Amino acid sequence: MKKTEVLVVDDERDTCELLEMALARQGMQVTTCTNAADALEKIASRDFDVVLTDLSMPETSGLEICERVIALRPDVPVVLITGHATLETAMGAIRAGAYDFVTKPIESKTLGVVVSRAVQHRRLREQIKMLRAARDANQSLIVGGSPAMRKVADLIDRVGDSDASVLIHGETGTGKELVARAVHNKSKRREGPFVAINCAAVPHSLLESELFGHARGAFTDAKATRMGLFQQANGGTLFLDEIGELPIDVQPKLLRALQERKVRPVGDNREIPYDARIVAATNRDLENEVREKRFREDLYYRINVVKVEVPPLRSRGSDTLHLAHHFLKQFAERSGKPTLELSERAAERLMAYEWPGNVRELENCIEHAVALARFDQVTVEDLPEKLRGYLAGSFVATANDPTEIVTMEELEKRYLLRVFKLVGNNKSRAAEVLGIDRRTMYRKLERYAALDGTEAPSAEAGERTSEPPGPPVEPGPPDGAAVDDVSGAALPS
């Protein structure tokens, strides 16, 4: 273990030697200087843990040395030695930036305690700096470099300093909680707590108690008063994840708490004020939930002051590879393996895949690959089976590999299913986009399901499943594809 290094500065050599002996007996490594110039030269060239300097010296005072040390090495604590502990001395030491001061005559035990405390203070500051750097690195990873995530980052920067409620919307696995933490870290509440609850994971009967707390005896198992999450988040941020799953009978109580900035614990007559920013997240279309009377409109507008749309991974371009490299490093370190790289072919498969499970699925994929990797490189063979056998949904007419060429039927199938997915699995809308009637749409979906051995997608709620008879219209080619004038078939580009 590295010894604590102390620089002692005093114009009297005898005092330097006495201090050196006292600190050396406590296992510290001591360097002494009898003039300020020599001391400042040593400080500039070496990293001491603590500087211990006399206050009254003929050429340069201890206060001046303290100021110079802080200018050169702001992380190094300075302890001043004085013969007169007055209020004026204390104020001068604080203004100069000193960590502490001791008075003469100095007891060896007291000196050791003060120096050790100064060292602990420095190490704590270094840990805080490391944690903040890690937080900032993590935040930059969340933001990524794609245009879609730069837009998210800009919105987080703009809304950070306000106390406005934020609603984060995105598919499952896109990292909505990480975005919520980024909002918290950018806010003036960053030093306060970040308290999260998944509204879908807490039993209905306990949700109100979790949010608002309860009084002793409020129900059978309430053996003691319990503080709710609103109060626990005081001074910080309360993150309500999956708020679209909130039971309809709890919604009015949540609305009142947000409007009044007070909560009433279960079984209590008091209303307790709280001071927390509200950030909510959902993968549901809450506007549709409001129309269907499953979510209160007034609550929706209360939580949706600023809306952040988190894009799916498939629309984030090269962010996929940046995240993959991050997870590679993370899981390699965790498993004690050397740093791994992605092979070119493995990277191509990651970029081609559509990631229905988003960032969470990518993380799982990389953990799988690291567990199976035998060399210093992750290859296609190390990826999960669904990625090893995956063929991109886009048709590449100029491919060099014959296995990438697909039949016209397969091309039509992929194009139809792609459109179906883009319109949210709404058959009527898909049929409209493709220029075919719904009967033809249903027939084709059933045919593709039969070929794949799967079940055809069911009709949307409220969508008509019958259609007046009419001549089937075959779908046209994908946008931008050349068409044969005679057959009407799509030609290779």
Image: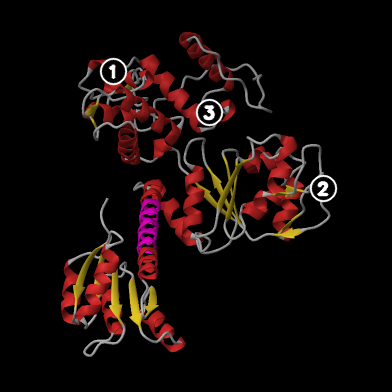
Say which amino acid is labelled 1.
Ile
Q: Is residue 144 above or below residue 43?
A: above
- Of circles 2 and 1, which is in front? 2
Range of magenta residues: 119-136
Residue 371 left/right relative to 277: left
Contact check, label 3 and label 1, Cβ < 8 Å: no
- The answer to which of marks 3 and 1 sits earlier in the sequence is 1
Across and down, in percent, residue 237 comes to 57, 55
Magenta span: chief secondary structure: helix
Across and down, in percent, residue 53 comes to 28, 77
- Name the residue beneath numbered marker 3: 430
Quarter of the image where one finds residue 327:
top left
**Which residue is painted at 61% across and 54% down in the image?**
233
| Mark 1 Cα-neighbour bin, 10 Å: few <14, some 14–19, many ≥20 | some
Q: Which mark is residue 405?
A: 1
Residue 408 left/right relative to 59: right
- Of circles 3 and 1, which is in front? 1
Q: Which mark is residue 267?
A: 2
